[in-house]
Image (spheres, rainbow, N blue to C red):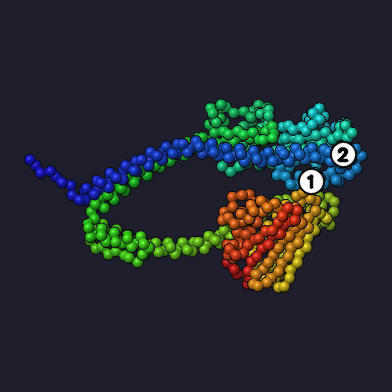
Amino acid sequence: MGQEKKRNFQESTRRLFLFYTIIPFGILIVLFFAFTIVNTRLSVEKKSAQATQTMSQSIGEVYRQYALETVRMAASPAVVDYVRMRVGSEKVYAEFYEFNNRQQVKSIFHIVSPEGVFLATSAPPDSLGSDLAFGNLVHRIAEKQTLLTETNSFRYSHDRITSYTFGKAIMDEGHAIGYLVYQLFETDLQKLIFLQNNEVAAVTDEHNTVVATTSNITKGILNKFQLGAGGSGKAQLNGGEYGMNTREVPGTPLKVHALNSLRSERDTLVTLSIFIAAASLLLWIVIHFLAKKMSARNAESIDKLVRAFRHLRVGNLNEYVDIRTGDEFETLGEKYNYMLDRLRELMDKNQELSRISSLVEIKQLQSQFHPHFIFNVLETLRYAIKMDTGKAQEIVMLLSRLLRYSISHERNVKLEDDLGYVRDYLKLQQIRFNERLQYSLSVTGEAGSQYVPKLILQALIENSIKYGYRNQSSLHIDILVSAAQGKLEMEVRDDGQGMSEERLDEVKRILTNRENTTEHIGLYNVHRRLVLQYGEEYGIRIESGPGAGTRVMLTIPYEEDGNHV
């Protein structure tokens, strides 16, 4: 009876290593493919659902604002008096522009007499010709008497097209003396539904007519939203299969639709499958090679490596190994020593990267600027050019100084320079709001010569103007700056309606979070910027109460040379 051939240590180790490696590796591949297939469909559904939710909120808010404004404007004493006696047109236009300037979706405004004569309009004069479609629109408003909302298309000069209309009869003593019309621009509605991570979006009315869309291939005959059937949650569009989510906009006759291609997701799945197959083959070759090499280790080399790794586990980066066997273990020992050197280098680099990350975050927070302010100033300038050329020149000079200062590259500036920017900014706002905005600015001691982060008070003042006018027509803002005990204290105080205790607590919680996932970024950015730059003891404090106005206090340390990092 022949003696059974025994495997040597090297062969046994190699086979055992391969066996226990291939099993979990195979299971991971199977689970990865199953997860990828399920996740592909869920990803499309989630993107579409998130897109319709976002669009529903945006479109619903636009609809609500215009519905309320149409009803309010039609009953406005200024409008009724103007239609009845043809006087006070400036009040009518002022009310329209004040509303329109606040909207994301702009509109054309008309007041039409029962005979079809345009009494007031924001459209260019050359676009107001006889239009049968507009006459029919006025006729439908007259028949409905209540608020009319409908999808229609009117083309104005410069290829400006409106796609949705709000209309209401102007009543006086029970009789219609005119008709008020708001027509929403199609391009503004399209911008509202252009969303990142979503391919095609559309808004339709109760008759399935397209109000706005990001792709004209969704339009069928007579501007209807028409797609091929593709099963539950799917649609055929331009020869391709799409995942579709439809959501009704609450309180409106509108619906929003989001479509994302399933083909791109399938292509991604195929690409991933090829990559996994290629990576698996490569890993199998590498594992087979490593198994053979590892099986050749001897006991002495293993002991040295085990001791070395024990030292490494407790954080000792000075325990090098000395293996001189002339085989693979010597190479492994050298690689281990090289790894220790690399770990040291990486730890040093990590500390440096941590410092740099703070600087990058500061720069990102500092670079944000409110675009709506520029838009509002330009709207005010356009009106001033017609009414008061001297005022228009003043606006241009103030705006040029403001922009020149905002695009300069200094990180820290003298407080007196930054307050010069604040004065220009508030002057522009005062031109816009006239006597409805009053302000004062007080600087005590030598605070003006200290260095502060650029535009440090911008968000605080913007917040006062943005929220101070709620439920009141006028606003007073006080800006107080003082220096004491090595610190600069800055305060922006307004006499607005203030905040409830619950709202104040919510704002304070946002300021203390390391990450802000809300849409309220102004005060958070200022506070986070100061905490990163100066430390946790500095930043913003807020005091407010219902009907008591709001005080925002900002504290930073003295900085006389502008080189603080």
- Mark 2, residue position: 80
In the current view of this chain or complex, which residue is farthest to the left? 1
- What is the C-alpha distance between the residues marked 1 and 2? 18 Å
Quarter placement of the N terminus:
top left
Residue lying farthest to the right in this orientation: 85
Which numbered disc, 1 or 2, marks the residue that appears first in the sequence?
2
User: What is the three-letter code of the residue carrying label 1?
Assistant: Tyr
Q: Which residue is found at the position 73% from the left and 70% from the top?
A: 444
Q: Quadrant of residue 35?
A: top left
Q: Residue at x 54, y 36 (%)?
A: 45
Could you say which disc has been placed on residue 248 in the image? none
Crowding at label 1, few (<14), some or many (≥20) Cα neighbours within 10 Å?
some
Position in image of residue 112 (x %, y %): 84, 35
User: Secondary structure under badge 2?
Assistant: helix
Residue 44 versus residue 432 in the image, above or below: above
Residue at horizontal 57 percent and vertical 33 percent from the top? 244
Can residue 112 be seen here? The reply is no
Tell me: 95 left or right of 191: right
- The residue indicated by pointer 1 is 97
Q: Nearer the viewer, residue 258 or 77?
A: 77
Left or right: 260, with 405 as reference point: left
Percent x, y of residue 80 = 87, 39
